[in-house]
Amino acid sequence: MRAWYFAERPDGEPTMDSFDLRETERPTPQNGELLVRVHYLSVDPYMRGRMRAGESYAEPWAVGDVLQGGVVGEVVASEHDAYEAGEFVTGRGTWAEYSVLDGDDAMAVNPDVAGLPAYLGVLGMPGRTAYFGLLEVAEPRPGDTVVVSGAAGAVGSTVGQIASLNGCRVVGFAGTDEKTAWLTDDLGFDAAINYETTDDYRAALDDAAPDGVDVYFDNVGGPITDAVFTTLNVDARVAVCGQIAHYNDESVPTGPRKLPQLIAPRAKVEGLLVSDYATRFGVARDRLEAWVAAGTIDHRETVVEGLENAPDAFLGLFSGDNIGKQVVRVE
Amino acid sequence: MRAWYFAERPDGEPTMDSFDLRETERPTPQNGELLVRVHYLSVDPYMRGRMRAGESYAEPWAVGDVLQGGVVGEVVASEHDAYEAGEFVTGRGTWAEYSVLDGDDAMAVNPDVAGLPAYLGVLGMPGRTAYFGLLEVAEPRPGDTVVVSGAAGAVGSTVGQIASLNGCRVVGFAGTDEKTAWLTDDLGFDAAINYETTDDYRAALDDAAPDGVDVYFDNVGGPITDAVFTTLNVDARVAVCGQIAHYNDESVPTGPRKLPQLIAPRAKVEGLLVSDYATRFGVARDRLEAWVAAGTIDHRETVVEGLENAPDAFLGLFSGDNIGKQVVRVE
């Protein structure tokens, strides 16, 4: 089978030099494991952190190892009581045609709810991140104005829709007119700002969020975040989920200091990792599946065809090529 | 009587040009008010914010008005049932020899507990800020390492001692050897760092806080804060009480971005204003009075003599002239 290996750590923006596609032996599942034919592979911004040798919130990838990532596919051999060959599952696998998954960590896929790629997006890790990050870190209240950066991504698009369900006014930042149209026309965002064609983010926010910002769900960082911090309301809550604008920085990025801006609004800023909510992943999955099945929450996946194009799909995350969840079709 | 008036808004570091000492009529208390002979006047860093026309967390001072501030003194005429002439009270007054106080807002002074100046420091607004900011925003737990900037100030010195009572390891940043000696020798701080004579704050923290930082109580901002943010533990809490390093900045200060540093530790950063806890000021006062009376919490005041020197006392806050609470002796 083919699999992608981590060839070298990137310096700044990653290139193909970090990736090496090789022929290798199909792995063999041990007790409690599943061998899965990978149908779709997930590429995610957090993986940039795994490319670093030093501190990150995810374990660093070892140079020379096969790359890891979320997958969804068909069980071809099971050494776990809960699954048998022919079933479809999702879990933590590898950038490869076949992956061995920990059966306890895997989740069953319900094909009546959505297609396989959705289980890497709204029904997978990004959806759970949106669910817990918004509801438990940002704690939105009906009537709040919620601003989301990276709003057309897998996490952001789900955050905005849950915030709408929660009775909030929702404003999204995204980087193309197609994305902003999707947010407002299909997902029910109250307003969307194209950050590529807008010069003055603060002025755009004054239009889109005239009562100020009660909740900011940040996937991006940089100048969008700088603008949002100038218009935080009293008791504002900021959930720091991602900072993709800074993932390729090789030195500590600088910008406007934010701590002085927190005192007057008594604002709270909090980092989050979805893994902290692992004991309740099932709760989020059930809720999200119900919303998706009912059409209450919409979703979209951008599919790159072929395992050989997985690095391109990953690199495209940093230029915003994806609408909704970026996945790679392997089978 | 003499009183200080606000002459003009400063640009950057305030100078004497902002202050005007004038002879004026002694005010007359109305129903519910007290006329107080001011014995001590409080000067506080937050007053720099009141000098600005625009947004601040305190109401801007109007040019031409008498300056406002906390005072402690003797009631010379009372129009409030709870007080009579000859009693000592503290409350919100003016930079003047006599102030009219709102009787409902005033608090009685207990001379058996501490001298009058302490009622502007550990037993006044700074002590309440320390109490609620540490215990309710930073939420220290026994075993936590707590770092305090501006540790030899009125707020910081109280924060550190309450943190010690709470079973924490306490590390303070201060700007002279006399201050750091006071923290470690008299107040029971576990370590103190002289930021004026230390080049590498992170290395100093690695020595003083070898297990990382669980709580950071920030009164200062700037490079000290930058260093602390590089060593936050998982679940760290940062209480942003003040940012005196930036109060004289006329444009938005820049520095290392901190949001990317919050994700891995899932750290929480929160601004605070003591006025939010007004309904429970009595709880804090009772607790702090008991600790001070028992000698459990130590305190110190730096006294500038004479109302005419009040602006100097205020300006000295920005160069760290004070140890403990800076007050002005008026009578």
Image (tube, coloured by chain):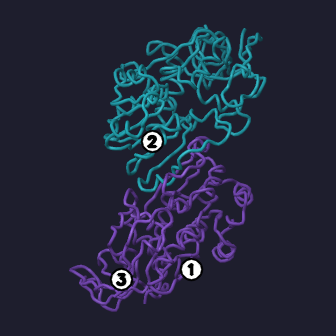
Chain colours: A cyan, B purple
Residue count near mark 3 (Cα–Cα under 10 Å), binned few <14, some 14–19, many ≥20: few
Q: Kindly report the distance in space between the C-alpha atoms of the residues bearing marks 2 and 1.
A: 42 Å
Q: What residue appears at the point 58 percent right and 78 percent down from the top-left corner?
A: B298
Pointer 3 indicates a residue of which chain? B
- Type of amino acid under label 1: Arg
- Type of amino acid under label 3: Arg
Q: Quadrant of the C terminus of chain A?
A: top right
Pointer 1 indicates a residue of which chain? B
Q: Position of residue B86 (x, y in %)?
A: 34, 92
Quarter assignment of residue A246: top right
Pointer 2 indicates a residue of which chain? A
Q: Is residue A89 left or right of residue A30?
A: left
Q: Which residue is mark 2?
A: A227
Q: Position of residue A121 (x, y in %)?
A: 51, 22
Q: Mark 1 or mark 3: which is in front?
A: 3
Q: Which mark is residue B181?
A: none
Tell which residue pokes out farthest to the bottom in this image. B86
Q: Are tags 2 and 1 found on a single chain?
A: no
In depth, the one of B120 and A93 nearer the eye is B120
Residue count near mark 2 (Cα–Cα under 10 Å), binned few <14, some 14–19, many ≥20: some
Circle 3/circle 2 CB separation < 8 Å:
no
- Type of amino acid under label 2: Ala
- Find numbered disc 3 in the image and state the secondary structure of the residue it sits on: strand
Q: Position of residue B236 (x, y in %)?
A: 59, 51
Q: Which mark is residue B22?
A: 3
Between discs 1 and 3, the one toward the N terminus: 3
